[in-house]
Image (cartoon, rainbow, N blue to C red):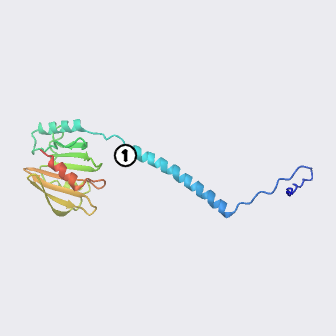
Amino acid sequence: MRERAPAVPAAPDGLPVAPPRRKGNVGDMVRSLVVTVVGGALVFGGVFFALYRDRHTAPVRRVDDQLAGVVSGFQGAGAPFPLLVPTGLPPTWAPTSVQSTVGMGQPKTLSPSFRVGYLTPGGRFADLEEAAEPVDHALAAFGATDPVPAGTVTVGTASYVLARSANGVLSLAGRVGSTYVGVTGGTSGGATQAELVQLLASLR
């Protein structure tokens, strides 16, 4: 025969008294805390992933037309040194910035120079510098400070000094005819040596 549950004692006014509440133990508190922390981490991770994805899949702002205009202005201004133009690079090489101190209304008192920044097919950065004098100072502006020579690299008929700075920045610098040329990957997300060589090999 089943035992009957004990009767709930009545309060003095005749109303039933609620049974005592079950006290939580340490295990319950730990489980609740774990669920809260894990849930918060999942939410934060989802938001971070969404922001990271949006940032790194944003379209690259190419300056192909601007590059063509700067090259035309440079060559039409008397060309203080033979300009070597990147030619025949695959479309996956995206020019993202271009600067020149020659033509396009630039003052003639500036030291003549030409610079193009690229985003490589591997998503890294490469910078090309050309001038009528050694480009070491220009490369230093992109993090190639106190470079240590690490040999020479021949590209076409030109020889370039390969250097690596203390913070790992690669650079290649040399001279093609009367034009001083240098390439570097900058301080973060920099191009590989193979990519820098490919950029030099495209100069015409």
- Locate residue 123 relative to residue 41 in the image: left or right: left
- Locate residue 201 relative to residue 169 in the image: left or right: left
Dividing the picture into quadrants, the one containing residue 174 is bottom left
Report the residue at 34% width, 40% height from top. 59
Q: Position of residue 186 (x, y in %)?
A: 26, 54
In the picture shown, does residue 67 fall above or below 183? Answer: above
Which quadrant is home to the C terminus?
Answer: top left
- Locate residue 185 relative to residue 23 in the image: left or right: left
User: Is residue 105 at least partly visible in the picture?
Assistant: no
In the picture shown, does residue 169 fall above or below 93? Answer: below
Dividing the picture into quadrants, the one containing residue 65 is top left
Q: Position of residue 97 (x, y in %)?
A: 25, 43
Residue 138 versus residue 186: which sits nearer the camera? 186
Q: Residue furthest front?
A: 1
Report the residue at 52% width, 53% height from top. 41
Report the residue at 43% width, 46% height from top. 51
Q: Position of residue 9 (x, y in %)?
A: 89, 55
- Locate residue 47 relative to residue 91 in the image: left or right: right
In the picture shown, does residue 115 fall above or below 24? Answer: above
Report the residue at 92% width, 53% height from top. 12
Q: What number of labels is visible?
A: 1
| Three-letter code for the amino acid on which mark 1 is drawn | His
Residue at mark 1? 56
SS category of the residue bearing label 1: helix
